[in-house]
């Protein structure tokens, strides 16, 4: 767990962002961005492929940041919102085939207390834990994700860049990294200082979406929200919650509103849409209550806060069932982080018993509580008991969270001298299947590396480590691991010939990618020394 204060960020990328931002800020920004019609080409010199490459470049920086959070349980929940919205957007025809094929379509988490979400080119949507903690229903959270997805499907970032100026791909990436850095600041003065000086107005004009883009994202997002089966009131309720929260306490903790200004017009239009749509069914309430508490715990792991949550979980006996359930969940997770394992197990079991009394029962919420019980038992060094908790899951048994927990439990048994070869083999095979379908999952690749190594599959372990480094943005490290795999294959008889062939082919792919990146940087005059590469060998 990271501390509650914002983590220190790498200096070099931030300096690059500010330098490049100031370099292109001198150009004037039009007061009004003229949006093309939805069917009109939104780009002239920024192609779909180039936009995806920009998104990948930014994601490599984000994944290397300590605030990037890969929490399987919370990420599964966000993905359960993102995927139906994405499917509805496809069904509505909002995503052209060329964009659908080339974009990444991935939601990810940022461990920050601030209320924020943001869209990146290439199909990536980031969600801060503070936003999940603020929302009181799945429909409210879905409305924000739908709005951000609309920014992606309508390519607002590329369109805004073209309207402002003809940016190069590098300057576009620098601009967006600057947006994220400013948005993640918990201090409004810090964010403002980053764009201070004579060019401040120009830079801010490029950072913020235009009002036309915001209205379009509201309209498109609302259509996607309702088509995906979420309650139409979710967007209006979310706007009202943001408006009320910022009026009561505008301390810089709502960077979402700096890049997405909330106007009276937007609020009234959302209310009108909800009024004409009528009452919606709404999403089941218990699961969001649990995930809201999980976000609150993980965004602030200060021991005093955790102790308070443990006490609240124990003392909530007279509250309504939903509040008792949420308090017990937060208390169990907090106790586990404090290494109070007996209290964590007791509260997690108590929460699971409460969920069984809910009317109506929520299978997904019960699944999340079974995952919590497995998590606290793994943290307590009880892998066999954790596997028993996982065996009780009957909903989405092949999901990412139980997959990773099963693998960890099998590894812990192996390391404790209690080998469970069948469980370890099953976990390795399941992970191999998973990464074949989800090749950008760095966490699954790392777990596959560990289970493969424990099972004696050394080449597979090395290759999985390389893939994990590649997905995390460490191209050089990935190439080094693949070279180590080649050396191991040459030096040992009986190694897996197929795995060695895969390593050879993958190394050629990554070296070619490294060469392309090197030559692009050389063309920009920003290249450093790279082993085996010379600018003179790049095409002119």
Image (tube, helix red, strand yellow):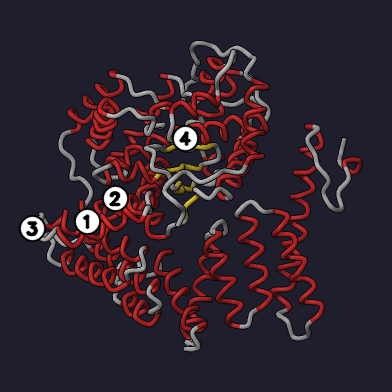
- Residue 219: mark in rendering: none
Image coords of residue 103 (percent x, y): 55, 43
Q: Earlier in the sequence, mark 4 or mark 3?
A: 4
* Circles 3 and 1: CB atoms closer than 8 Å: no
Q: Secondary structure at mark 1?
A: helix
Horizontal side of residue 472 vs 299, given as left or right: right
**Position of residue 249 measured from the top left corner of the image (x, y, whole percent):** 29, 29
Looking at the picture, how far across and down is residue 464, in whole percent? 62, 67
Q: Secondary structure at mark 4?
A: loop
Q: CA distance from mark 2 to mark 4?
A: 22 Å
Residue highlighted by disc 2: 292
For marks 3 and 2, the one nearer the N-term is 2
At horizontal 64% and vertical 15% (from top left) the residue drawn is 26
Which residue shows up at 47% across the image and 56% down it?
A: 70
Which residue position holds label 1? Answer: 326
Mark 3 crowd level (few <14, some 14–19, many ≥20, 10 Å Cα): few
Count residues near mark 1 (Cα–Cα under 10 Å), then give few for <14, some for 14-19, many for 20+: many
Q: Is residue 102 visible?
A: no
- The answer to whether residue 468 is left or right of residue 426 is right
Q: Is residue 510 left or right of residue 457?
A: right
Which label is found at residue 318? 3
Query: What numbered label is drawn on residue 185?
Result: 4
Q: Are marks 2 and 1 in contact (CB under 8 Å)?
A: yes
Whether 207 is drawn above or below 430: the answer is above
Q: Earlier in the sequence, mark 3 or mark 1?
A: 3
Task: Give how far apart the Cα atoms at labels 4 and 3 are.
Answer: 39 Å
Say whether disc 2 or disc 4 marks the residue closer to the N-terminus: 4
Mark 4 vs mark 1, CA separation in Å: 29 Å
Q: Is residue 50 left or right of residue 237?
A: right
């Amino acid at each position: 767990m990271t501390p509650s204060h914002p983590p220190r960020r790498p200096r070099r990328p931030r300096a690059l962002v500010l330098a490049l931002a100031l370099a292109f800020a001198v150009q004037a920004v039009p007061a009004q961005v003229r949006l093309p019609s939805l069917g009109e080409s939104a780009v002239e010199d920024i192609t779909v492929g180039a936009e995806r490459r920009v998104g990948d470049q930014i994601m490599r920086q984000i994944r290397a940041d300590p605030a990037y959070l890969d929490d399987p349980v919370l990420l599964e929940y966000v993905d359960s919102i993102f995927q139906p919205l994405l499917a509805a957007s496809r069904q509505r025809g909002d995503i052209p085939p060329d964009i659908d094929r080339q974009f990444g379509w991935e939601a990810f988490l940022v461990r920050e207390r601030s209320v924020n979400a943001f869209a990146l080119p290439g199909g990536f949507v980031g969600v801060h834990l503070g936003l999940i903690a603020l929302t009181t229903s799945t429909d409210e959270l879905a409305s924000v994700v739908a709005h951000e997805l609309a920014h992606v499907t309508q390519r607002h970032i590329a369109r805004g860049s073209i309207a402002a100026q003809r940016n190069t791909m590098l300057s576009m990436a620098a601009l967006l990294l600057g947006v994220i850095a400013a948005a993640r600041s918990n201090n409004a003065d810090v964010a403002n200082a980053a764009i201070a000086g004579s060019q401040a107005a120009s830079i801010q004009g490029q950072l913020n979406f235009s009002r036309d883009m915001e209205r379009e994202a509201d309209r498109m997002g609302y259509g996607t929200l309702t088509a995906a089966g979420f309650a139409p009131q979710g967007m209006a309720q979310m706007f009202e919650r943001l408006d009320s929260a910022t009026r009561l306490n505008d301390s810089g903790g709502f960077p979402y509103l700096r890049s997405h200004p909330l106007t009276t017009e937007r609020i009234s239009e959302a209310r009108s849409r909800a009024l004409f749509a009528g009452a919606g069914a709404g999403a089941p309430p218990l699961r969001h209550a649990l995930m809201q508490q999980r976000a609150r715990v993980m965004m602030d792991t200060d021991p005093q806060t955790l102790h308070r949550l443990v006490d609240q979980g124990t003392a909530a006996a007279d509250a309504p069932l939903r509040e008792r359930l949420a308090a017990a969940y937060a208390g169990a997770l907090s106790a586990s982080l404090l290494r109070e394992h007996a209290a964590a197990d007791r509260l997690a079991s108590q929460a699971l018993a409460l969920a069984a009394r809910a009317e109506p029962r929520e299978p997904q919420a019960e699944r999340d509580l079974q995952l919590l019980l497995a998590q606290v038992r793994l943290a307590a060094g009880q892998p066999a008991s954790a596997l028993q908790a996982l065996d009780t899951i009957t909903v989405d048994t092949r999901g990412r969270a139980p997959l990773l927990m099963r693998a960890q439990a099998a590894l812990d048994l192996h390391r404790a001298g209690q080998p469970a070869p069948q469980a370890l083999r099953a976990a390795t095979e399941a992970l191999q299947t998973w990464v074949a379908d989800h090749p950008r999952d760095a966490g699954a690749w790392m777990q596959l590396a560990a289970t493969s190594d424990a099972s004696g599959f050394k080449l597979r372990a090395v290759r999985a480590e390389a893939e994990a480094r590649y997905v995390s943005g460490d191209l050089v490290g990935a190439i080094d691991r693949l070279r180590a795999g080649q050396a191991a294959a040459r030096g040992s008889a009986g190694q897996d010939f197929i795995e060695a062939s895969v390593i050879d082919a993958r190394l050629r792919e990554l070296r070619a990618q490294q060469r392309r990146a090197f030559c692009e940087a050389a063309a920009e005059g920003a290249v450093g020394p790279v082993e085996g590469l010379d600018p003179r060998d790049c095409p002119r």
